[in-house]
Image (spheres, rainbow, N blue to C red):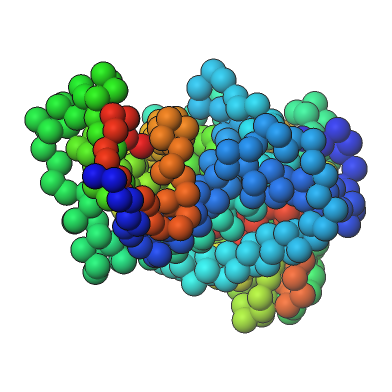
């Protein structure tokens, strides 16, 4: 196959919500780390350079402002994904056998990257990070309103347990982002695709998927 | 969160500092995706807009929280066995600097939109019906602790002094120069009490002798200690931390 043609990979709503989310999530994580430092749950703190807000009050102001952007954008993405069928089409099905097979192929660098199709490992990770996103928002709501939303805080095991749930969900999201950025670095052509929405389809080569 | 000087700072000082810091950090936050480490030395000149947006969002959050606030929703209560021992001390100064209030010449001043401005002595406050609660104190820093406070339900106190409960705010001034304020709906909440006792003893200095406002539906910094004056008003009274950037409503 010698001819190279362009295909649409990421529809506009997905690209817009992806980048808005990248900004909002960065604000939330960095300001959240500054809030964490005010009363660390574990025997470590985050370095100041990785935090946002300058002091506790500034960090909370960022956190409680950016949360509207994060949640509004996240709801828009989920709504679009459900109505358009994007979520079902791109993220399902998730079959354990396929995940194992694709993970093995990826680790041996023998997994083809198809710009318009997510492999089973990608599908699993994307679904997991969406669930972590829902978890971080729900536990955050429980911490923000432990009295008004007592049922939510109660479902998470109470205020102190909700702090830990919030931290674990954050850690899951940050871990996902680390893998995500590593794979973008390994397959750099996926980056312009998330901006322009289209990718060149040509003879597949052996590469890891992002 | 404890400033090096216990002097209550002028709000404008802090706004300025906050603005400078936030200016730097907005740039870092906005462009951090992929290039964080390169930007740590950047100094964005025009960041006032960011500061204004953050303050505007905080006022928006005040309104949302007022709408979410259910005046009948009670904060969870706990058995005595759940009380955190020792209950942590927290203020904008170290524990040794907690004010030494002399009970004999202390009286609670009452002013603003009230009918009876007679100051209240401790003995007289003790003659009013008292209530006790074991609730969770949640600090804006993230930690929480369960304690027991007893005293006069603030709602009955406001009724007793003929407060205009249609007014928007109740403000408090403290012996340690701390100050804060509540929305009227929270002031009237059944669990908001003028606490005279911690556990079964009168409040020790570290917990706010002689009078502390206990508000289990707000973060800890909205629970002023060493109260010397309260006033009912329609003019936004702000607060020590609120004027520096903590969200004013800060409801739980």
Q: Is residue A30 left or right of residue A165?
A: right
Above or below: residue A183 compared with residue A145: above
Foreground residue among A141 and A117: A117
Q: Is residue A105 left or right of residue B64?
A: left
Q: Residue at x 64, y 50 (%)?
A: B30
Foreground residue among B242 and B89: B242
Q: Is residue B83 visible?
A: no
Q: Position of residue B82 (x, y in %)?
A: 41, 32
Q: Quadrant of residue B202?
A: top right
Q: Residue at x 39, y 65 (%)?
A: A13
Q: Is residue B172 left or right of residue B188?
A: right
The residue lying furthest to the front in this view is A2
Q: Is residue A201 left or right of residue B49?
A: left
Above or below: residue A166 compared with residue B164: above
Quadrant the N terminus of chain B occupies: top right
Q: Residue at x 20, y 37 (%)?
A: A120
Q: Position of residue A199 (x, y in %)?
A: 37, 52
Foreground residue among A149 and B209: A149
Q: Position of residue A163 (x, y in %)?
A: 44, 37
């Amino acid at each position: 196959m010698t001819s190279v043609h362009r295909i649409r990979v990421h529809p506009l709503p997905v690209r817009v919500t992806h980048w808005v989310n990248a900004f909002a999530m960065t604000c939330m994580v960095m300001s959240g780390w500054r809030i964490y430092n005010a009363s660390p749950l574990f025997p470590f703190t985050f370095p100041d350079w990785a935090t946002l807000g300058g002091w506790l009050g500034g960090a909370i102001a960022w956190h409680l402002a950016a949360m509207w952007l994060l949640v509004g954008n996240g709801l828009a993405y989920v709504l679009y994904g459900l109505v358009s069928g994007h979520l079902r089409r791109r993220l399902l099905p998730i079959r354990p056998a396929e995940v194992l097979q694709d993970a093995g192929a990826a680790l041996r660098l023998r997994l083809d990257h198809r710009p318009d199709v997510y492999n089973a490992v990608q599908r699993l990770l994307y679904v997991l990070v969406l669930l972590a996103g829902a978890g971080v928002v729900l536990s955050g709501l429980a911490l923000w309103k432990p009295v008004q939303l007592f049922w939510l805080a109660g479902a998470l095991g109470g205020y102190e347990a909700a702090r830990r749930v919030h931290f674990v969900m954050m850690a899951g999201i940050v871990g996902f982002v680390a893998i995500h950025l590593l794979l973008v670095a390994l397959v750099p052509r996926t980056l312009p695709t998330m901006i322009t929405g289209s990718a060149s389809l040509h003879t597949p080569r052996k590469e890891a998927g992002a | 969160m404890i400033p090096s000087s216990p002097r209550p700072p002028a709000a404008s000082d802090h706004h300025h500092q906050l603005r400078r810091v936030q200016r730097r950090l907005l740039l870092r936050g906005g462009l951090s995706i992929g290039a964080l480490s390169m930007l740590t030395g950047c100094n964005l000149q025009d960041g006032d807009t960011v500061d204004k947006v953050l303050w505007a969002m905080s006022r928006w959050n005040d309104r949302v929280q007022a709408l979410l606030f259910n005046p009948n929703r009670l904060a969870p209560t706990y058995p005595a066995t759940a009380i955190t021992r020792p209950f942590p001390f927290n203020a904008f100064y170290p524990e040794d600097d907690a004010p030494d209030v002399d009970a004999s010449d202390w009286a609670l001043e009452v002013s603003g939109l009230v009918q009876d401005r007679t100051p209240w002595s401790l003995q007289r406050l003790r003659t009013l019906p008292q209530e006790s609660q074991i609730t969770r104190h949640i600090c804006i820093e993230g930690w929480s602790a369960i304690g027991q406070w007893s005293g006069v339900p603030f709602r009955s106190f406001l009724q007793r002094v003929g407060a205009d409960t249609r007014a928007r705010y109740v403000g408090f001034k403290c012996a340690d120069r701390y100050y804060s304020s509540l929305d009227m709906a929270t002031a009237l909440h059944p669990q908001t009490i003028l606490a005279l006792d911690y556990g079964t003893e009168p409040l020790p200095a570290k917990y706010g002798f002689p009078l502390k406002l206990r508000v289990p539906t707000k973060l800890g910094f909205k629970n002023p200690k060493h109260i010397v004056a309260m006033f009912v008003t329609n003019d936004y009274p702000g607060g020590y931390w609120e004027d520096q950037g903590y969200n004013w409503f800060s409801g739980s």
